[in-house]
Image (cartoon, coloured by chain):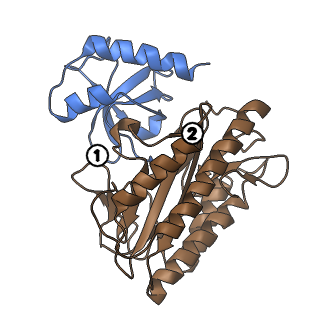
Chain colours: A blue, B brown
Amino acid sequence: MAQDGNAVIGQLAVSKRGRDRGEPYLVLEIIDEAFVYLVNGDKRRIENPKRKNIKHLRFYPTVAEHLAQQWEAGQKVGNIEVRRVIAGFMETVEK
Amino acid sequence: MITLKSAREISHMREAGRIVAMALQELGKRVAPGVTTGELNRFADEFLRRAGAEPAFLGYQGFPASICASVNEEVVHGIPGLRKLENGDIISIDIGAVYHGYVGDASMTFPVGEISAEASRLLQVTRQSLFEGIGQAIPGNRIGDISAAIQQFVEAHGYQVVRDFVGHGVGARMHEEPQVPNFGKAGMGPRLQPGMTIAIEPMVNVGTYEVMVMPNRWTAVTRDHSLSAHFEHTVLIAGGQPEILTQI
């Protein structure tokens, strides 16, 4: 089954450029072909997402489906859940 | 992180691949005018389970079936249902099996009855482009060598490769790192090492490479409604020539 080659909402992404290098986020919103809004539920909360260039991110093939559905429906909620999901994802990718 | 598979993991992936290959072979015999895509899905689901595997696609990020059945201008991720195949159609069937926790993933585009010369040429070019890509899957090469070989072959024949969907690493999960695009520059991207397992899957359109996703959130179709084909194998990077795991 082909993988979506573009960033998708709810996807795990880790910063590879900038002062936040190494920081994991989830994609909250896709702004255009070059930029996304990111959240980590802590310094970057849903009410204050980080705008970042896609080129400065490393995307992982992992998507938080339940959050993506809420966010796509316009319900911008779940800072605590974002933190929980990121912690879980990072356990699986950083072996 | 790109995982290298152990001998035990590879043996499970070989079996998963073999089951997928057999399922595709049997599905090919059942593709005919009048058959619905839903019937093909039911057959595939039973076949996988009887072979001791689980369908990898069912429930994957909410996908509702055990195969993707993409007809004519549908590129990938077509949802099987009541659609009846007609003489002259082409149908891409994508299928994945999980065996002992490891995934085999493959796809083929089949002709339905008698198809046009253009459709027939599209199938030949897409299938051959997959093998052009596999030919580059040797240790020391990079992912970009696979991507460039596919893109060059396809474009030399006047067709376009889809950009929005890509091949992928495969193993304990269906989608692992790295991404394996069907376009790009030779010499770029992660280096290939023995023990890597990747799904190489060119999606080739007669017209524009642009696609759009239908309101069901899955089915991708060509923006200009031109025909599209899709061939895929799960491939093991070995010491020398690659081993195609989803081939009998």
Amino acid at the residue labelled 2: Ala
For label 2, the SS is: loop
**SS category of the residue bearing label 1:** loop
Mark 2: few/some/many CA within 10 Å (<14, 14-19, 20+)? many
Residue shown at 49%/71% (left/top)?
A: B110
Q: Is residue A19 above or below residue B10?
A: above
Q: CA distance from mark 1 to mark 2?
A: 40 Å
Q: Is residue A61 left or right of residue A33?
A: right
- Spot occupied by residue B122 in the image (x, y as percentages of width and height): 50, 78
The residue at the far right in this view is B240
Seen from the viewer's position, the closer of residues A69 and B2 is A69
Q: Nearer the viewer, residue B25 or B243?
A: B25
Q: Nearer the viewer, mark 1 or mark 2?
A: 2
Name the quadrant of the N terminus of chain B.
top right
Does residue B6 appear to the left or right of B91 in the view shown?
right
Q: Are marks 1 and 2 on the same chain?
A: no
Say which residue appears at 23% left-offset and 20% top-offset: A46
Q: Quadrant of residue A29?
A: top left
Indicate the chain on which mark 2 is placed. B
Residue wearing tag 2:
B53
Q: Is residue A49 above or below residue A41?
A: below
Q: Amino acid at mark 1?
A: Asp
| Residue behind mark 1 | A32
Please state which of residues B190 and B217 is positioned toward the viewer in this rendering. Answer: B217
Q: Is B36 above or below relative to B158?
A: above
